[in-house]
Amino acid sequence: MSLSVRIVASVLLAMAVMMAVIGSMTVSGERAFLERQFLEHGRAKAEILASFAVEHLLVEDYPILESTIKAIGVKAPLIKAVEIRVQDQVVAAYASPPQTAARLFEVPVTIRPTEDSPPRALGTVRLWLSEDANRDAASRRTQLLVLYFAAAGLTVALMLAWLLNSLILGRLGRLTRAVVDLETGELTPAALSKLPGSKGHSDEIDILASRFRTLLKALQNYQTNLQNLVAEQTRTLSDISAFNRKIIDSSPVGVAIYDRRGNCLTANQSLADIIGTTRQYVLGRNYHDIESWTKWGLHEIAARALAERRHLRREVTLETAAGKSVSLDCHFVPMTGKDTDLLFMANDITVQKAVEADLERARDDAQAANRAKSRFLAAASHDLRQPLQAMSLYAASLGLSLDKEGPVDKRKVGEILNHLTQSIDNLSVLLNSLLDVSKFDTGRVQPNVMEFPVRQILNDLSVGFSAPAHKKGLDFTVVQSRAYISSDPILLKRVCDNLVSNAVRYTDSGRILIGCRRHKDALRIEILDTGLGIAENNLNTIFDEFLQLNNPARQSELGQGLGLSIAKRIADLLGHRILVRSTPGKGSAFCVEIPLAPEREAVPPPARRASSHGKRGFDKTVLVIDDDPDALDALLGFLQSIGYRAMGANGHDAVLALPPEELARVDVVVADYQLGGSKNGLELVQDVQKRTGRVLPAIIVSGATTRDAQQAFADSGLVHLIKPVEPGTLQDQIAALTGPP
């Protein structure tokens, strides 16, 4: 054995003994060091997680927080389990807490809103690290120490044996520097390439260096992966935060977050628009300094929500700076798991409130209509039974009078027939009125608005009501006007007829004056009377159905109580106003306001001869055209009974068959509109006028209510009577058209 070998063997033996002694002394200290390092490592990990969790707990983003700690737990074998608690509630966790072989590290999650304020606890991070991994690490560290001391001893031995072989010292020096650089984080790839064993394994130092490099690369890969994971999660959280911000900013609901002192941390534009200010004005401002908050008392509700830690809701109605009234549904929500922030949401419910108000009004209108319908049906039922009952009794009395033996008492029979006729007339008027109410309520009548002279209405009123007014001894005056108006002439005449009819009916003495008065862009047809008058508290109810203020006994000769109701319905359909003023005991003034049409050249109205209603023995001839034999015979008999010469025709052929000398004697034509032949009543009147070469006055009788028929009647300029026609009305119209003999 050579000396060098013996020297090496001796040195190695000495170094082995020395290293064994040193190693045994160092192991216990190293284990204590590793234990401290394990504790510091666990607490550091927990503090990192606590720092990482602050942002997520602030926004209550628990799903992202849980997915992140799970990803960290999967990558870190030392971590057995992780829990993040908020108010003793687990909001995020990785694995279940282990029962054995694990060490618990618990760190609070805190935030300091400002530098001067004390920290505020948001929650707690609980981390369990593996004890087995710690022991394995201690064992590996001990092995590394043994290797270290062995390498050191070997180095010393070789240095001593080979006289401080520079090669060994250099290699050990590079390895030592690499270890130091690793601890300080300054190890570079260039330094790593110069470590021993870069070109192969020649001895224990090279093997140690190779293992060192392998371990270092593994640590570097782990660090890179961890950094990439953190960067990815950070980008994800940033994207989510930006997405949430876009949602809040684009939301029509006003949103703001306030701290406990009332300072606005964030707010969207919708909130600024709702309260009538700018977003910059709201941000950072205390809600005590916002006038609208203090005006509505919202600051007190916010303080209550924070103090009681519960969701409060209030509906307020405010007026913005622009003077617009806005209804808001306000929510005050303390942030879950936090004790400083308040979420405020304001939803504009102005439209919803308007819809609710409309629905409530519609419900009230429907209920009022239902009550009115009940009153209407009750009154109609009573008024329909009255004439039917009277007709039944008069018919029975007539039958008894005719069944008696001996001569018939003509006077008594005449009285019964008069009463029976009156009951029939009352029933006819009532049925016509009820049909009119039904037509206007169901929208079956559509106005045909045109421009025409108001004298057309005034002339009809003069012809139709002069005789009844004079019969009561009233002074009846119609003041003509040259104005043109825009309305439906037929429907407007119905309105005026009903108003004038009421004036004649309830005026016992004095006068009735009808005239026109201009008012801005409208013309008012005014009907003034010196009748009973209406009390002021009844002016709003006189247009109700079956309401008769001066007829508590509901006498049929005083009307049915539907005239004003029908007039109001027609006026509403035409868009005209009916104005009323009255003084009890002095009279009333009813006014219909109609839009004016452009002025035109005045055309004098055709002359009307005075009415002679009630006189008999007219030496006048009436041509009656009707395809119904019974109706034709009845009308001919009626006309002959009141003194007219009457001749009939049941259609077009019969009219053509009349001798010219007979047609030449005709003074007025009364024709039904709907005939069975190819021509209607208007067309047959035109044929008669052509054959006679004269413009004969004519009366068209019809039950047609279509818009086309009404337009045809208006265009013809002839008198139009609606079936059933009262005999007295027909007699008045014939007398007005023919005049005295």
Image (cartoon, rainbow, N blue to C red):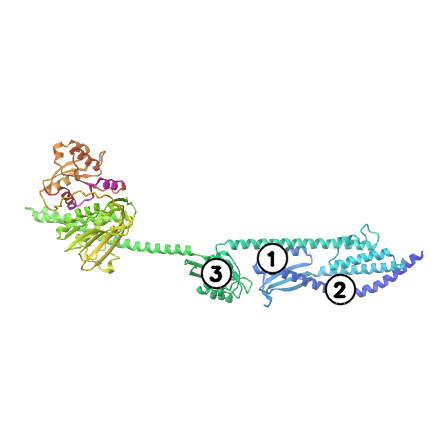
The x, y position of residue 415, in whole percent, is: 10, 49
Q: Nearer the viewer, mark 3 or mark 2?
A: 3
* 3 or 2: tag closer to the N-terminus: 2
SS at badge 2: helix
Residue farthest along the left direction in this orientation? 406
Q: Is residue 193 visible?
A: yes
Q: Please give the name of the residue rendered at 65% of the width and 62% of the height, measured from the top-left corner.
A: 47
Mark 3: amino acid: His
Write down the residue under mark 3: 331
Label 1 sits on residue = 65
Left or right of residue 295: residue 476: left
View extreme (right): residue: 2
Q: Are marks 3 and 2 in contact (CB under 8 Å)?
A: no
User: Which element is circle 3 on?
Assistant: strand
Quarter of the view holding residue 126: bottom right
Q: Is residue 331 magenta?
A: no
Q: Which mark is residue 31?
A: 2
For label 1, count other residues whose C-alpha is less than 10 Å away and answer few (under 14), some (14-19) or many (20+). Answer: many
How far apart in space, not on screen, are marks 2 and 1 (Cα)? 35 Å
Horizontally, residue 274 falls left or right of residue 690, namely right
The answer to whether residue 659 shows anywhere in this view is no
Q: Position of residue 361 (x, y in %)?
A: 35, 56
User: Measured from the top left, where is residue 406 in percent x and y?
Assistant: 5, 46
Mark 2 is surrounded, within 10 Å at the Cα level, by few (under 14), some (14 to 19) or many (20 or more) other residues, namely: some
Q: Where is 319 relative to 615, above or below?
A: below
**Residue type at the position of mark 1:** Leu
Q: Which residues are magenta?
A: 708-731
User: Residue 553: which quarter of the image?
Assistant: bottom left
Viewer-proximal residue among 425 and 103: 425
Q: CA distance from mark 3 to mark 2?
A: 59 Å
- Rendered-image quadrant of the N terminus: bottom right
